[in-house]
Image (cartoon, grey):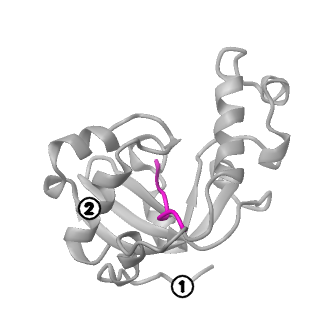
Amino acid sequence: MREKTPFLACENLSVLSVPQPGIPPPRIWVVRAGRGGKYIDLFRSRSIVAVPIEFNSHASRATADTLIAAGYSPGNAPGVAALLRRFALDLEVGEFVISPVSGQRRHLVGMVASDYRFDLNEDEPRLRHLRDVSWQAEVPASELPIQLRRTLGSPMVFYLPAAQGDLRSFLHERGGL
């Protein structure tokens, strides 16, 4: 088991606000820690982020047909397959994730530290699609402007919010983005 990562004072988040010629700034994704934030303590203590979807195969094998065979409904299977593949293929090392902590009105902010991996040995079947994260900050929801609260309030499990500039500005003002 990994050691608990201490929270930092946003010192590594400065890369979001320092423009680099020809290099787009890192994106900021939202990854939910399960219904009601069920897995947030595991996210934090193990320095991981995961899409809490039960599918016992690598995300590259996630298709509507394989998910239907795994028990997903034909209506949900294509969306779940796309979500798994996006988590595996689109999220990049060095980008940022925000994990809302439901019920506690706070958000964890971290930097993605590893490529996607599928861990069949993980005891919790909903945490087998994961990445390592260096958690950098914890932001009280009450400090977020209302438009960002709405942006981060989507029930989607994993998504890229449209308000990238607003998120970057807010986190920069908070302590170093």
In percent of the image, x 71 and y 24: which residue is there? 77
Q: CA distance from mark 1 to mark 2?
A: 31 Å
* Left or right for 3, reference 80: left
Q: Which residue is mark 2?
A: 169
Specify the quadrant that holds the C terminus.
bottom left
Residue 100: x and y in percent read: 36, 52
Disc 2 is placed on an element classified as helix
| Residue that mark 1 sits on | 3
Looking at the image, which residue sits at the far top?
A: 75
Could you say which disc has been placed on residue 108 in the image? none
As drawn, 150 above or below 93: above
Q: Residues within 10 Å of mark 2 (few under 14, many from 20)?
A: some
Majority secondary structure of the magenta segment?
Answer: loop
> Which residue is found at the position 16% from the left and 49% from the top?
145
Depth check, front residue: 112 or 123: 112
Q: Can residue 123 be found in the magenta stretch?
A: no
